[in-house]
Image (tube, coloured by chain):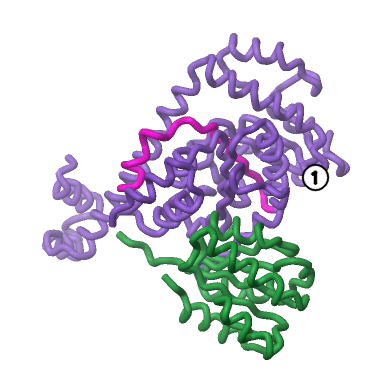
Amino acid sequence: MVEKRKIKVLVCKPGLNGHDRGAKVLARALRDAGMEVIYTGIHQTPDDIVNTVIQEDPDAVMLSMLSGAHNALCPIIMEKLKENGINDVLIAVGGIIPDEDKPFLEKHGLKGFHGPGTELKTIVEFVKNNLKR
Amino acid sequence: MDYSNLIDQLFEGNPRAAARLITIVENDIEAAEKIVNNIYNKTGNAYILGVTGAPGCGKSTFISTITKIFVDEGKKVGIICVDPSSPLTGGALLGDRIRMKQNFTLENVFIRSMANRMQLGGLARATEDAIKILDAYGCDVIIVETVGVGQSEVDIFKSAQTVVVLLVPGLGDDIQAIKAGIMEIVDIFVVNKMDLAGANRKVADIMQMLELNKNFVYESQEISKNLVKMKRWTPQVIKVNSKTGENFEELFKIIDIHKNFLESTGYLENYQLNRIKSETLQILKYKLTKKIEDLVNNSDKIEPYLEKAMKKSLDPYSMANKIIEFLGLE
């Protein structure tokens, strides 16, 4: 019998992001939507994140960025994921992402860009509708 | 589905293959059967350490510290952390990795979080299979962290060679220490957070429960010899500080003594035998329950008996016997 497949999501804060109220609220919302959510805590290096993705095999990764370093960190993370052959995982970034940076990040394969004021159910639906497997 | 590619990669020590296989056994029990079938003869090399204890007693921090020591010894370590699923939504928040940020590399340490998906007993259904996958992946040590347990989640006892329970000062008195359940399955009692007041009292309570009159400072060689002679393991008690690593050297001595004890007394074989039995039993229960539920809920075979039961001319025990007959299990 095939049990109902659970959506597994990784929520993490890359780099010097230390403010994680938003990430915790998001983790809680995804949990309440019936997903299995791994929260890694703050100050994750790109290598930490890629290792975690390899070991936990999540369906989606939510990067929470408030520090302004998204243009520097996100491409590194995407590059390292690609190096490891990871191409069937939804990678989203949210937090404080200025509009003018979105095309650059999109070009690197990132999605989402949910900022302050986004309704939680919008993000839950976004995850459900953009899974790659 | 053919998993031979992934399994080949697993044997080569590819962490992505290990991770994907664990995902598959978590989600699909029929696939789990095929996978275990193909890797089983490559398992049995890992030492399995179970870590259990109440929520917040420091299991994840403890595991992080102990893993560091295993890694420094040159061992490859697998960690499986089980956290609870929500009974309302089925969702889960898996937060054990937060405490395990010691810059472990991908080569040395494989950490996997697992939701228990409402299975009772402290582990997930797929935990046993995940242990086998990490074993075949080449881990020398596999540490299994149970969900934060209460008093009777004792499944870890069937899977692990050594079971460590973590206790903290200030929770419960000597009566808690003599209750049945989890306190009976433990090989090593660890009083964590030894810097807090009451740590010595906690150690004393446990030792009293174990009727140990030995001094807390033990002579490892002596104990080892005595245990082998008695052919019976006396649970050991030690206090540690997981944050500073204080007393972990002594703890490792005790773990080594327990390992030697298992090997030299034949207990290891006993453990392996029991593990196979209990696993087989669990699988049988799962499979037979499915068959029985199908028979009771969807089969017209038992219609006539149901009618009789409604008229009170047949009782549920007799009906159960009929069903056993149908299954050919008499």
Magenta region, residue range: B33-55
Dividing the picture into quarters, in which one does residue B12 lie? top left
Q: Which residue is mark 1?
A: B243
Of A73 and B220, the residue lying toward us = A73
Dividing the picture into quarters, in which one does residue B72 lie? top right
Of B256 and B185, the residue lying toward us = B256
Which residue is at 52% across, 82% downward? A126
Q: Is residue A92 magenta?
A: no
Which residue is at 67% across, 53% downward? B55
Of B322 and A33, the residue lying toward us = A33
> How many labels, in total?
1
Visual hue assigned to chain A: green
In this picture, residue A83 sits left or right of residue B176: left
Asked whether residue B176 appears in the rendered view, the answer is no
List x then y, in percent, for residue A19.
78, 72
Q: Is residue B44 magenta?
A: yes
List x then y, in percent, for residue B78.
56, 43
Q: Which chain is purple?
A: B
Q: Chain of mark 1?
A: B
Which residue is at 88% across, 42% downward? B197
- Position of residue A38 relative to residue A124, above or below, is above
In this picture, residue B298 sits left or right of residue A39: left
- Position of residue B269 relative to residue B240, above or below, is above
List x then y, in percent, for residue B211.
70, 23
Of B264 and A92, the residue lying toward us = A92
Asked whether residue B39 appears in the rendered view, the answer is yes
Q: Residues within 10 Å of mark 1 (few under 14, many from 20)?
A: few
